[in-house]
Amino acid sequence: MNADAAIDNAIAAAAVAAAAGNNDADADARLAVLDDVSLASADDDEEVAAAPSLQSFVEDDSNVPPSKRMAYMMMLCLRNIEGFNPQEDHPYSEFFNRNGFKSRFKPTKAMIVQELKRRDRDARPNTSNNTVEMLMRRIDPFEDGADKEYVTRMEGEYRQQLLNQLQQESEEAGNAVPRFQMRPDDRLRVALMFDIDDIYEAYMRSQDCLNRMEIDAGMSGAGADFHAMAVEQLNDREWVPECEAAPTLHSDFAYRRAVPRGDFEWTPEKLKKYIGDVRRNLSDMIRRYEISGNGSNQATHDDGDNEDAIESEEETWGRFNAERARRVAERRGEQDVETSGGDDRANFLRHLPVDWLYTWHAFDQRGLLHFTCVRLAQGQAANSHESPAPTARPRSNRLNDQMARNQREMLTSVQDIGDSIAEFGRAAKIRRLDQLDRELVDATVARDEATTEAGRATYEAYVARLNRRLDALETEVYGRGSVEARGASAASGTNN
């Protein structure tokens, strides 16, 4: 019985007593009013106190078992501690993906319903049509008080427990970085090793297929040769390549710096897996970049100086044109053109570390994007516009003939795709020839402009080296006759 009902009953009793002319009864009725109000107020206080405090509820094993207590408190931390994010905050982030820990940082529907009913026994949340995120929004943050202080205190205790565990693990490991942990510099060395011509050419041959005779002879193929060469180079401590300065790419690459080898030990299996990661991550970054409208394909259409020389999307896919990016950024009125040069590729890393930007940059500079990401031209892509050959046994000779025709067409299509892939490899070698030609021209000019005998001798040796590489690559692409013809043409030009 609440206070209002008690007052109504007492007033009614006093009125009956007054009508009967009984003054004593009237006084007793007035006293009863006060007693009933006091009793009703006490009953109301008991009902309010019936809802347990957060601490007493959580620490009761019958309500929240010890194995789920941390998860329950993390749920309340998400709603009561501003900016709390166990997936990103240290030290929680170190444990977030560990076995047995991930469930401790993610609330469940059952926990949310339990907290809602603790606050209001009559709560009936709909768990069927609501997600965890929708149910979480129904948990109101605590106002300043014992419950909020308890949440803050428990978060600090859990944080300290995890910090102590990390410290213990570090001491047990002798403060050493595990050998299997790949660092950013280890990834950068992979991108930089393609400056070595032998590794570059082995990589471009790594997708060549063996013929029947080579397979029968037990040959391992060009792919195994590339992985063996690359692993030997990457594990060589005396090889210390340098990252070129690329300040518009990211502030981490503002200056040229050496990239020494760390403790990571490369193996052919690890390198194969990493090359697969490169293919996937580069494709994802470039896809986001192109779709955004800021890629070189879309920027071409915003560049008034290039409207008559728009390159095909296949040629510009993933490439970065620095001059065009600056012109477009200036035309759009961007504020940081002087520092970024219009290069906004860093906006499309998403969750990847910064060193992946340099991998993109290095593969772009060396013409490896299309080859690495297996980017075929539209005309070379397979499609499903035609029905596949039937696999059920035909019931007539006419169906037999149709099946034979379908199989022949399928074999022809497969052969055409194989020829296209072979042509793709040949196109990559031709692009390499063009690059070597440009380098040869630059080296020849530098040799002729050298002012000292030592400088002229250095460039002379470099020109001879480039000529040997050109001869070898042209022989592979065009045959011996083309090399002899080029040599004769060069000699004729010299005599003239």
Image (cartoon, rainbow, N blue to C red):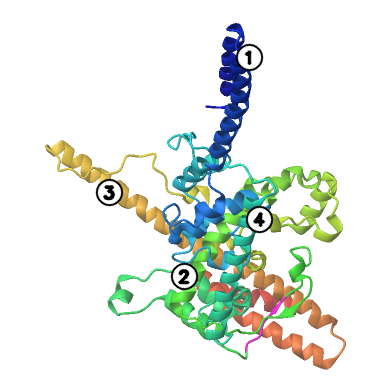
100 and 65: which is toward the camera: 65
How far, Cα to Cα, is label 2 from label 4?
Answer: 49 Å
| Helix, strand or loop under label 1 | helix
Determine whether, in the image, residue 70 is placed left or right of residue 447: left
Q: Main secondary structure of the magenta part?
A: loop
Magenta-tinted stretch? 239-243
Residue 188: quadrant of the picture: bottom right
332 and 198: which is toward the camera: 332
| Helix, strand or loop under label 3 | helix
Closer to the eye: label 1 or 3: 1
Callout 3 environment at 10 Å: few (<14), some (14 to 19), or many (20+)? few
Q: Is residue 242 magenta?
A: yes
How far, Cα to Cα, is label 4 from label 1?
Answer: 56 Å
Q: Earlier in the sequence, mark 2 or mark 3?
A: 2
* Dots 1, 2 in contact, CB < 8 A: no
| Helix, strand or loop under label 2 | helix
Q: Earlier in the sequence, mark 4 or mark 3?
A: 4
Callout 2 environment at 10 Å: few (<14), some (14 to 19), or many (20+)? few
Q: Which residue is mark 3?
A: 408
Q: Which residue is mark 4?
A: 149
Residue with the most extreme bottom position: 454
* In this view, 394 is above or below 34: below
Res 276 seen here: yes
Q: Residue at x 63, y 21 (%)?
A: 30
Task: Determine which of the numbered discs, if any, sits on residue 23 in the image.
Answer: 1
Task: Determine which of the numbered discs, if any, sits on residue 273 in the image.
Answer: 2
